[in-house]
Amino acid sequence: MQLNYKNIFLVIIIFCLPYSGCTDMKRYPDTRLETWWKSYKKNFVLPDGRVQRPEHGFDTVSEGQAYAMIFCVFMDDKKAFDLIYGWTEEHLSRGNKHGDQLLAWYWKDGSVGDWMPASDADCDYAFALLLASERWGENTYREKALQVINDIVRFETAQGANDRLFLLPGLWGNEKGGYLVQNPSYYSPAAFHLFYKATQDSRWLDLRGTGYWLLYQSGIRLDKRDGCGLIPDWCVADVQGNILTMEGKSNDYGWESVRVPMRAGLDLIWNKTEEAKKVLEKIYRAFQTSISDSGEIKAVYRYTGEPAVEYGGLPSSAMAYFAAQALNRNADTVKALFMSKLSKRTSGQDYYGQSLAFFPLALEEGVLQVAGQ
């Protein structure tokens, strides 16, 4: 007698329907990172792929688009990546209007508000595209990344003191007299390493070297002031190689330079770079001093290490925890401070803090190590 296995299987399924043990797959609770990602997309990523900043009138910056694309790669969320990438190309690409592959940095109320590109976002954008091409095997991402990378070098760099190649903030910053405006947090050594591997263009190694020189030197000397290792938001490099304050811009360790632990930390984690370790150790020492003195990590510090504000912040605590992780330090105290800020009800609308929170959360769960290799 020939058995009809299809019918037998159907009978078993019908018989088991009343019993949850037969039909329910075992469900595991989301990890902290998965919960974070669902919340991030709900709060900041619109259905068309635009990343909004609720605390800034629901505007959009190229930085936010690039950050979210990086998160998509590490979270293996190709659907979200393609949505965000598509919106970015359609609304922020300077190609049709200006002829290059860089991004307009600012968009609000249905149109671009400023067509000037920002080099940090352009670098993160190309970085996300290269990572995506490696993860999902799509060469179109790589081709676009190479176009962006080429235009960054072409339009957003300048030769400076001691024949160093510097990253400019955008299509500006090359001032009269050889003064170069610098934002140290724009330098992304891990991305530059990947750009060199993709292009074999040694200028990316030059920029990587300049970045570490700037990150280290700006933390110990600014004009005639000695530093404690904290990096200024903005500065100027002169033709003699001195690092000076920039008039009209913050020289605090503030909302710009708070990202430096992420920039250096990724390079330390992936490439074991000694220069990254030196930069992070100085910054982390300042964090430890602050915790000892006040019991928390303030949102902004003066260049010389004194708190500039009385309140803490999610961005600074996230980066302190990430620095501790990258340096393999005992992170219990800074982790507790970070988790306290992350769990506050208002933190859900903090686009910048939530964006930086991704990195310690992802490193904690091993996602960064897997995706970065």
Image: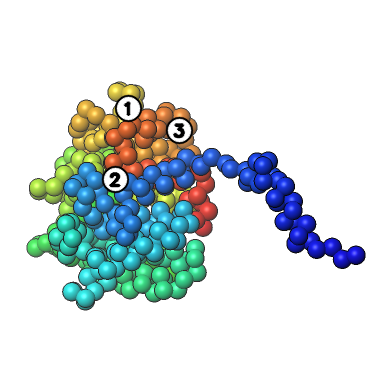
Q: Secondary structure at mark 1?
A: loop
In the rendered structure, which disc, 1 or 2, sits on the residue that comes first in sequence?
Answer: 1
Residue 140, image x and y in percent?
41, 74
Badge 3: few (under 14), some or many (20 or more) residues near its Cα, within 10 Å? some
Q: Mark 2 is on which residue type?
A: Tyr
What is the number of the mark on residue 331?
A: 3
Label whose residue precedes the other's in the sequence (2 or 3): 3
Binning the other alpha carbons within 10 Å of mark 1 as few (below 14), some (14 to 19) or many (20 upward) gives many
Please give left or right for residue 1 compared with residue 223 in the image.
right
* Residue under the image location 42 percent in, 51 percent down: 266
- What amino acid type is highlighted by mark number 3? Ala
Q: Is residue 236 above or below residue 148?
A: above
Q: Which one is nearer the viewer's eye here, 362 or 203?
A: 362
Verify CB contact (< 8 Å) between mark 1 and mark 2.
Answer: no
Q: Amino acid at mark 1?
A: Glu
- Per the rendering, the mark at residue 296 is 1
Q: First in sequence: mark 3 or mark 1?
A: 1
Position of residue 144 in the picture relative to residue 7 (left or right)? left
**Residue 165 screen position, x and y as percent:** 27, 64
Q: In the image, 359: left or right of 114?
A: right
C-alpha separation, residue under disc 2 versus residue under disc 3: 24 Å
The residue positioned 31% from the left and 70% from the top of the image is 148
Pinpoint residue 116: horizontal percent, then vertical percent.
17, 63
